[in-house]
């Protein structure tokens, strides 16, 4: 039974493709990135799905930067919906990005996740590496096809579930409860 949800940020929760060039060209131009936050759109169906989750713990584990994640969440007024929000540096702001498995371990220390077994948590992602790492960590995995740039590759990573839209998450939760 799925008792908690962790999700990737970029192209899973939000479409951030419009602003990615601003941080992929060497040192990020944060002023330009923050000015373009309205272009980071919440994928259709997420707002309703978040409302329907009714207290199921929901967090973000992303290789993006916490400052951007929090600003986008605040812009869309869903800031308090996600706990934890773990970015590429984890909690202590390491100087180098941590592997996603270490980020998963940090997320499991948070309330709502810390008493759960790994197989009671689903991680939603848009890339094959998200699926592989979630599976290796012992999470259930969900391949989000609405934002992926690699639809064929993500399916070869053996996701536990395949989602065509965020609303599919509700069916998966009902299925896992049976």
Image (spheres, helix red, strand yellow):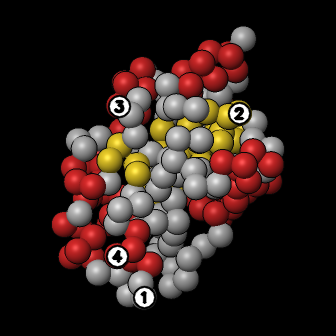
**Point 51% across, 59% down: residue:** 62
Task: Please say if 11 is above or below 169.
Answer: below
Q: Position of residue 114 (x, y in %)?
A: 60, 43
**Point 62% across, 15% down: residue:** 174
Q: Position of residue 153 (x, y in %)?
A: 73, 53
Q: Earlier in the sequence, mark 2 or mark 1?
A: 1
Spatial distance from mark 4 to mark 2, Cα to Cα? Answer: 32 Å
Name the disc covering residue 22, or none: 4
Q: What is the secondary structure assignment of the residue under circle 3?
A: helix
Spatial distance from mark 3 to mark 2, Cα to Cα? Answer: 20 Å
Name the disc covering residue 47, or none: 3
Q: Earlier in the sequence, mark 4 or mark 2?
A: 4
Outermost residue toward the top in this view: 178
Mark 1 neighbour density, 10 Å: few (under 14) some (14–19) many (20 or more): few
Spatial distance from mark 1 to mark 3, Cα to Cα? Answer: 33 Å
Q: Nearer the viewer, residue 111 or 54?
A: 54
Q: Which residue is mark 1?
A: 26
Q: What is the secondary structure assignment of the residue under circle 2?
A: strand
Task: Please say if 59 is above or below 2.
Answer: below
Q: Earlier in the sequence, mark 1 or mark 3?
A: 1
Tell me, yes or no, whether the two marked residues, 4 and 3, touch with CB atoms within 8 Å: no
């Amino acid at each position: 039974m799925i008792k908690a949800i962790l999700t990737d940020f970029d192209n899973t929760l939000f479409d951030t493709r419009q602003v990615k060039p601003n941080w992929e060209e060497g040192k990020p131009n944060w002023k330009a990135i923050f000015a373009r936050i309205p272009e980071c759109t919440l994928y259709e169906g997420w707002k309703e799905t978040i409302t329907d989750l009714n207290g199921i713990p929901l967090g973000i584990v992303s290789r993006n930067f916490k400052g951007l994640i929090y600003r986008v969440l605040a812009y869309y007024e869903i800031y308090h919906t996600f706990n934890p929000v773990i970015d590429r540096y984890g909690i202590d702001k390491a100087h180098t990005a941590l592997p996603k498995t270490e980020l998963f371990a940090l997320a499991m220390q948070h309330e709502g996740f810390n008493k759960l077994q790994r197989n009671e948590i689903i991680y939603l992602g848009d890339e094959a590496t998200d699926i592989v790492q979630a599976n290796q960590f012992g999470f259930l995995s969900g391949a989000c096809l609405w934002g992926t740039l690699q639809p064929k590759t993500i399916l070869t990573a053996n996701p536990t579930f395949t989602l065509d839209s965020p609303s599919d998450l509700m069916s998966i939760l009902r299925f896992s409860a049976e």
